[in-house]
Amino acid sequence: MASPARITRRTLLVASAAALAVPSFASAAPAQKVLTADPTRIRGWARDTWRSLVAMTPARTGLPADNIPESLAASDRSGYTSPTNIGGYLWSTIVARELGLITSGEASARLVRTLSTLDRMEHHTPSGMYYNWYDEETGEALRAWPGTGAVVHPFCSSVDNGWLGAALRVVAEADRAASGLAKRIFGRMRWDAFYNPGDDPAHPVRPGGLIHGGFFPFDHDRPGGVYQGTHIGGDPVWLTTHHYDTTVSETRITSYLGIITGQIPPKQYFAMWRTLPASCDWSWHEMQPVGENRTYYGIEVFEGAYTYRGMRIVPGWGGSMFEELMPDVFVPEAKWAPRSWGRNHPLHVRAQREHGLLEAKYGFWGFSPASNPAGGYREYGVDALGIGPGGEPGNPASGYFSDQEMTNYDVGFGSCRPATAPTPTYGDGVVTPHAAFLAMMHERDEAYTNLVGIQNDLRAYGTGGFFDSVAVRSGTIARRYLSLDQAMVMGAIGNVLCRDVIRRAFATPAVERALRPVIGVEEFGASRV
């Protein structure tokens, strides 16, 4: 199988189902006294978060930097940006307007400026896809890394372009002045450039086809892991042999865009793993799943789930909130797919909360890839909710870890592999505020309570909003702001306080007609035990 390790800026209903009510999965009493969410305080968080995004964004180009430290000084901007960052700034501008943080005129001016720069930027013309790295001050594609001068080989990432594409659709519906530019840029994007239907015997994939991690348009420095080819005709590119093959992943946004535009068939959605198989031949992944086989669009799907704290949950690759909930910022997945996402989303949020409060006893929760308080960047998550990055036979995999010590949770694999750490003792847990904001779309008061604690007790807050992460026991804070993580905060707040403003803009009637019958037909193995 192809590992879905991310190559992104971080190294991406049928009528009968529509009638079902979204189930409630309220948990046992939490370890925090739950407060009622205060819209005024949440609006203040959005105001400060927006301040950081403005500080990251040069007025001349309208392109946000990837990150900026606590200073918020223009001279401290990262010196690079990505399609994901640009998309995040676009949808954040819509939210800022809806919250009254900026006027409609300022919002339109900002959007047009960004899109005008984007329109002229170098990109892969046959597919309309953008490269991973640009200079935010000029819009020029990077060929050398800022600071080190290391060579940058342009790469078109399917998930990074997916987030830009999602943002373009939001702007096209939400701002009249910027709509034409957004539609033009989106209209030239070919999502089938990333789609491997499996028709090449030399590069087979699971039935239904999978999405490549991306491609190099030019020669590159990766002698392995790619092959020359094209799915849209014209000159060949260097496609990754790696494909995204798990459905609980931020990368499903690219599948959605391909299905919406008719460039990728619906069956591709069912080609991705829900879990890996339960047989002993696959005993290297996190735990033995339970479930049954069902068939959708001619594709047989193992509707497996992991068992954790009295819940059965469809896992992600790493077990992070970002994987589970980022596409839900745009697509009302719980509403359109009540028997799959409508079950899994609240269970995943509950599991993250109970892990932080009851199992690891951090006193706080919300785990997702973010800045490492000790320096650099790291992937955080709930190990039990992750299939496992990098696992292989004979080397049991783990999801992302929730603490600095990388404490492993291992309940074994039924009778195939004995447990080695079913009740570990956790260390210095790292919570990431943007993960709690995403959870606010499903547990408004519980997430609000958690964020108040992160602000008041952990002091992980500055003039630009919540810092990117904080280690709860040492008190070490990653005192910087990442534009994508800040944009996730803005997107979630927009949906919570502004009547699903991002979802309403993205999920038009045409999108609903194309996508709801696909995702709505499925029944996950997610449930309470």
Image: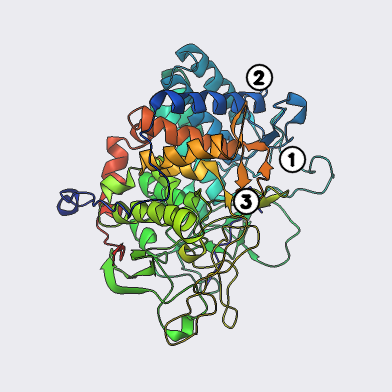
Residue occupying the point 68% across, 47% down: 373
Q: Is residue 30 left or right of residue 428?
A: left
Determine the CA span between mark 2 and mark 1.
20 Å
Residue occupying the point 34% across, 64% down: 311
Q: Is residue 49 above or below residue 371?
A: above
Residue type, mark 1 in image: Leu
- Look at the numbered discs 2 and 3 and tell me whether their residues touch, using CB distance below 8 Å: no
Q: Within 10 angstroms of label 3, few (less than 14), some, or many (20 or more) residues?
A: some
Q: Between 384 and 232, which is closer to the camera in this rendering?
A: 384
- Which circle, 3 or 1, is nearer the viewer? 3
* Residue 455 seen in render: yes
Q: Which residue is mark 2?
A: 59
Residue type, mark 3 in image: Arg
Q: Is residue 471 left or right of residue 177?
A: right
Q: Which residue is mark 1?
A: 142
Q: Which residue is mark 3?
A: 473
Determine the CA span between mark 3 and mark 1.
39 Å
Q: Between 112 and 98, which is closer to the camera in this rendering?
A: 98
Q: Residue furthest right?
A: 148
Q: Within 10 angstroms of label 2, few (less than 14), some, or many (20 or more) residues?
A: some
Q: Within 10 angstroms of label 1, few (less than 14), some, or many (20 or more) residues?
A: many
Q: Between 123 and 487, which is closer to the camera in this rendering?
A: 487
Q: Is residue 410 above or below residue 344?
A: below
